[in-house]
Image (spheres, helix red, strand yellow):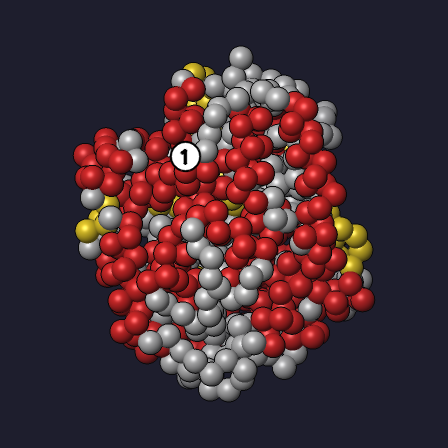
Amino acid sequence: MPYGYNGKILRVNLTEGKVASEELLEAFYRLYFGGEGMIAYYLLKEVSAAIDPLGPQNKLVFAAGVMTGVPVGGCGRHCVGGKSPLTGGFGSAESGGYWGTELKMTGFDAIIIEGKAEKPVYLFVNDNKAQIRDAKHLWGMKTLECQAAIRKELDDPLVKVAQIGPAGEKMVLFANISNDLDAFAGRTGLGAVMGSKHLKAVACRGHQRVGLAEPSVVAEIGKWVSENAPINDKSQHEFGTASLIKPLNAIGGLPTNNFMYGSFVGANNISGDRIRETIFKKRRSCFACPIQCKREVEVTEPYTVDPHYGGPEYETLAALGSNCGIDDLKAIAKGNELVNAYGVDSISCGAAISFAMECFERGLLTKKDTGGLDLRFGNAEAMLAMIEQIVERKGLGALLSEGTVRAARKIGAKAEESVFAIKGQEMPMHDPRLKQGFGLGCAMSPTGADHCHNMHDTAFITLSPQMKEMAALGITSPLPANDLSAQKVRLLTYYTQWMHFLNSAVCCYFVVVYGNIGFERMTRLIRSVTGWNVSLFELMKVGERAMNLTRVFNIRDGFTSDDDLIPKRFFQKQPYGALEIAIDPETFLQAKETYYRMQSWDNGVPSKAKLAELNIEWAGSY
């Protein structure tokens, strides 16, 4: 029997209303591992160039990895992918929670969604079977209502539901796919793809445990993770990702007023400490995870915030908070509830609002455009009103729902100065002027600006546990955060290969990286799960393989090296604050060229030799 995977995927044709299973060989899993690697394989093979991302020719792939569902902290994730309506290129996003494990327990490793249903439907996958069910009565529901309705209809409160909210139904270009109400495949607009297919939800219920080659070794490592990860990543355990607010603010790395500044006077009011002191209700976890970085919050006045929707994490606190100049924690918590209930990416949604706020203050938008809203930085009520407009595609929100790049083109050329996006996707809440390797990583990301398969330079400026771990890859010396030397590019190259591997396996960064599982223990864990005699070298190649497949996908759809750029404001110093540096344009271009050469990419195009070395020579014909 296979260990770590089921050997089967589910293919669902919504146009024809048919479902079928397909079997895959062990060699396939060892080459791609699942997650991002599997998705990149199928999208490149089966999605033609130049198709409309919101047309029936696009495919949506939900993929677990060989580590999904393994009873060890950090192994509860899954990946979703398709051609992105936001960027027009490769789209993928990872999510935690419990849904991925439940998918694996149904007996399938992935679901490929094809075509478009004539009317709203949802998919129910249950122990090696699947059926397409009517969802007309679910269409229009917010996520909490929809999950409750599906569980009631299936008469099972343990059914796990991945779904879109009304924003996905209306095809807001940064709509997300939520599961468990507080976990999200958030980026690249895959919720809009799901909505375009009239697919409201994918519900899973399974009873098939993941096969383990060496259960006793898995249990031993699982015990170590349970006992040590919360200690190694203590800040995440104590405060969640909100623990980042104060330290980033202190060094000028907290995006403020649409990336004008990196220090926010109201930072303490939206910090992890303040959450715990005021609106915190309890911690939440993902499958088998001891860190419990999620937070559940409750607010009763002046807003009512339902704790079912969890609580704001770092990216949301910065996107709806500091980057909009807002320090009203209760308003941000309400905003978090709204984006979760309606189903939009909080990063792109917040970025769209902060973009509009800057345009308003610059006179490029007026109250006539905003429907009377005084859309200035710091106006919490205006922020909440704009979320409602965006998810309903009404007023100015109809324009912002297309993303900031498209919105700026319609507002006028001057508005493009206020856009912070790469390849069409809005920047996550990290300032590349502080983390310059991160900035280069965003430029090279296949999904546009992304923080989840990137490096964060501040983790490598001292002999931190993360820095010490890199010695296994021959990197032994810390580097300044603002360094863009060849050595920093080398660190970025190796580290992002590892992150892309984790997105293929599919594992959580907080546990594996910051919980300090480490390369050696992780390699041993994968051996004990799969029975394969894998090496760290092989795992790194899995990540590099996924990176190159996504690169080929984008090049085939017209992306060039000209798209590997960052917004111009990052070449300028912040007007005030703790950070007194900017990225040097020439240094950035040199680092970009060095990156290409280290990857064996000819002006950004993977060479035939590189594809052959990665055993994906076939990709060169696409």
- Residue for point 38% across, 29% down: 31
Q: What amino acid type should be assigned to the residue bearing mark 1? A: Glu
**Is label 1 in a helix, a strand or a loop?**
helix
User: Residue 494, relative to residue 608: is it above or below?
Assistant: below
Q: Quadrant of the C terminus?
A: top left
* Image position of 383 (left or right of 60): right
Residue 5 picture location, percent across and down:
52, 23
Rate crowding at label 1 as few (under 14), some (14 to 19) or many (20 or more) other CA atoms within 10 Å.
some
* Image position of 435 (left or right of 465): left
Q: Residue furthest top?
A: 1
* Image position of 340 (left or right of 482): right
Quarter-of-image position of residue 369: bottom left
Instruction: Specify whether residue 558 is in view.
Output: no
Residue identified by numbered label 1 = 538
- Residue for point 65% across, 78% down: 266
Q: Nearer the viewer, residue 264 or 290?
A: 290
User: Residue 459, relative to residue 538: is it above or below?
Assistant: below
Q: Nearer the viewer, residue 67 or 242?
A: 67
- Residue for point 24% across, 34% down: 612
Residue 552 picture location, percent across and down:
27, 43
* Image position of 608 (left or right of 72): left
